[in-house]
Amino acid sequence: METQLFHIFRNTPLGRETLLQSIYFCKKIGASPAIYIPKFTKFLMYFENDVVQVDLDESYLTAPNTASDHATELLLQGGFNPRFLEPKNYTASTLPDIPTNFDFMCCPRSISDLSSKIGLGYIGPRVRRIVTSARFPVLISSPVYKPWKSITVFFGGSANAVKALRLGCRISRVSGIPLDVFTHAENRNKEVYEKIIQKENLEEDMALYADKWHIFEKGTFEENLYEVPHDSLVILGAFGHGLIKDIVFGSKMEKIQSVISNNLLIVGPKYTATT
């Protein structure tokens, strides 16, 4: 089956930026975008152990008479035949059910608050719920369209960090874009992380795809974030143990969001790594 990315289109200039990011991502990894143009401000996503109601702000319903044309124009310019998702089932007359059998989903940093209220240090609660429940990774787009020239995986040794590293190697393989691995040592030596790589049978992938493995033993985490290239796709594991738990949805969440504006690809606990 073809790889698909689910995208909620907002017919605004900021929404255009996000769709351009999805199109770029799809071109790089060989995926197809599935576009949803909402007619209502709410919809449901039924996951295996959770039902997430997504509440959109009114900007997602801007100029419905031109939304399809605008999205179509961008998709054609990107080399894709437009494919729009039309909900088949409704829990209520104004509450459509959106399928969840996608490989990726693209979101702005919040999908339920006006962008004028959103700072880099904020990821909306609905996006967090989706990351927690989805079997697919979630692409959190940068505030404006930004092509990426490298891939950066944060690796702290957790189970979800391992998944993120596998995904980073996969994207590097299919896109041909170089991969860097970043580890904030946190009072551990390199051998600890090397043993995890060996245990997870990732030595060959690291040798094939990882250009550099940056292990920071000095400096604060925030200081070391300066070494992340501004034009890199950053891949993170969420809800793991150790560094990655702290980075995403933990004590360091606000700090990393306020420091870097990169595109983020977040791997949640339900994601099943593929090759």
Image: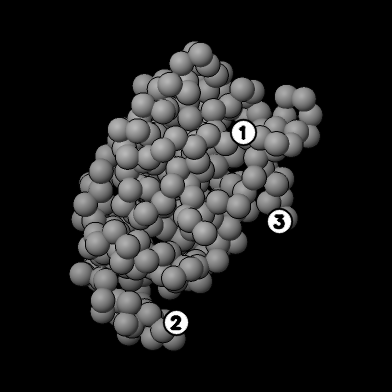
| Depth check, front residue: 102 or 142 | 102
The label shown at residue 200 is 2
The label shown at residue 48 is 3
Q: Tell whether label 2 touches label 3 (CB within 8 Å).
A: no
- Measuring 68% from the left and 51% from the top, which residue is drawn there? 47
Measured Cα–Cα span from mark 1 to mark 2: 41 Å
Give residue 274's position: percent from left, percent from top.
Answer: 48, 68
The label shown at residue 86 is 1
Give the residue type at disc 1. Glu
Q: Earlier in the sequence, mark 1 or mark 2?
A: 1
Labels 1, 2: front one: 1
Which element carries disc 2, helix, strand or loop?
A: loop
Labels 3, 1: front one: 1
Q: Quadrant of residue 91?
A: top right
Give the residue type at disc 2. Glu
Left or right: 70, with 86 as reference point: left
- Measuring 38% from the left and 86% from the top, which residue is drawn there? 198
Give residue 191's position: percent from left, percent from top.
Answer: 32, 85
Where the C terminus falls, by quadrant?
bottom left
Q: Crowding at label 1, few (<14), some or many (≥20) Cα neighbours within 10 Å?
A: some
Examine the rendering and report whether any part of residue 143 can be seen: no
Measured Cα–Cα span from mark 3 to mark 2: 26 Å
